[in-house]
Image: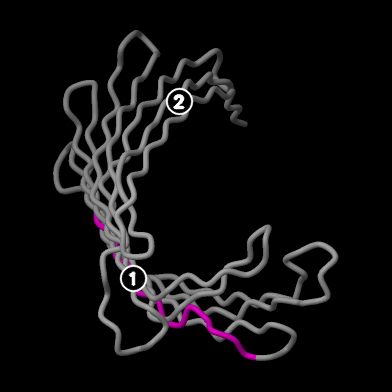
């Protein structure tokens, strides 16, 4: 079990603009259970409830994200020298949310996000590890009115792999490759979305 409360102060989301945004305070409660189901099987499930006050713009109440309910479940299974993880999560946002951006404040509508994913860790050499992964994600939204039903906002398939090579006990080199294909709804029309990314970084541990 866990709980937290976050209090935010006002700030200017756009440099030089006199308008101030003060995110609402948030109370977050979490409960979960996890543990082994066998010698090489590990299970975890968790739920999070978050209640947030309305955001304020220039000390005037504006829309806030309201209550959020999220759930997460995963199963890790050892397979010889490799391991496999399958997971799912669902997050529901009860009210529209004000999000600060570089161009000013934007409103994220009331909505729901569902994801199903799988990830494996595979040894390809003595110390080199390959981690392929894939995730399907679906988003639904409603307009600001409380009575509106959720409608499909879009869906995507995210995939990729990391190749990790230790250089020492404290230093790893990681090569990352990922991609996304899917669609989103804009002004009633379905728009295809595609993107790819390649990255490289050095990871240090103490």
Query: Residue 47 versus residue 158: which sits nearer the camera?
Result: 158
Q: Which residue is mark 1?
A: 141
Quadrant position of residue 85: top left
Quadrant position of residue 48: bottom left
Residue at image point 17% right, 27% down: 79
Residue at image point 39% right, 13% down: 127
Quadrant position of residue 205: top right
Q: Quadrant of the N terminus?
A: bottom left
> Height in image: 206 above or below 123?
below
Residue 43 place in picture, x, y as percent: 22, 51
Query: Residue 26 versus residue 112: which sits nearer the camera?
Result: 112
Instruction: Measure how far apart labels 2 and 1 are at the Cα level.
Output: 31 Å
Tell me the magenta residue range: 61-73
Magenta-colored stretch includes residue 66: yes
Q: Is residue 8 left or right of residue 185?
A: right
Residue at image point 24% right, 54% down: 88
Q: Which residue is mark 2?
A: 176
């Amino acid at each position: 079990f866990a709980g937290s409360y976050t209090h935010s102060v006002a700030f200017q989301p756009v440099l030089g603009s006199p308008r101030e945004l003060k995110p609402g305070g948030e109370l977050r409660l979490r409960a979960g259970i996890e543990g082994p189901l066998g010698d090489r099987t590990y299970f975890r499930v968790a739920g999070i409830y978050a209640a947030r006050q309305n955001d304020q713009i220039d000390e005037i109440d504006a829309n806030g994200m309201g209550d959020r309910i999220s759930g997460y479940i995963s199963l890790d299974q050892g397979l010889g020298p490799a391991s496999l993880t399958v997971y799912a999560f669902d997050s529901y946002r009860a009210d529209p949310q004000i999000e600060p951006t570089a161009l000013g404040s934007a409103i994220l509508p009331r909505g729901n996000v569902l994801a199903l994913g799988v990830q494996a860790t595979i040894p390809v050499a003595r110390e080199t590890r390959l981690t392929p992964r894939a995730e399907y994600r679906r988003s639904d939204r409603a307009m600001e009115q409380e009575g509106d039903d959720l409608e499909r906002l879009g869906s995507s398939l995210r995939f990729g792999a990391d190749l990790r090579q230790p250089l020492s006990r404290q230093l790893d080199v990681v090569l990352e490759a990922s991609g996304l294909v899917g669609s989103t709804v804009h002004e009633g029309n379905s728009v295809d979305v595609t993107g790819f990314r390649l990255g490289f970084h050095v990871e240090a541990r103490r």
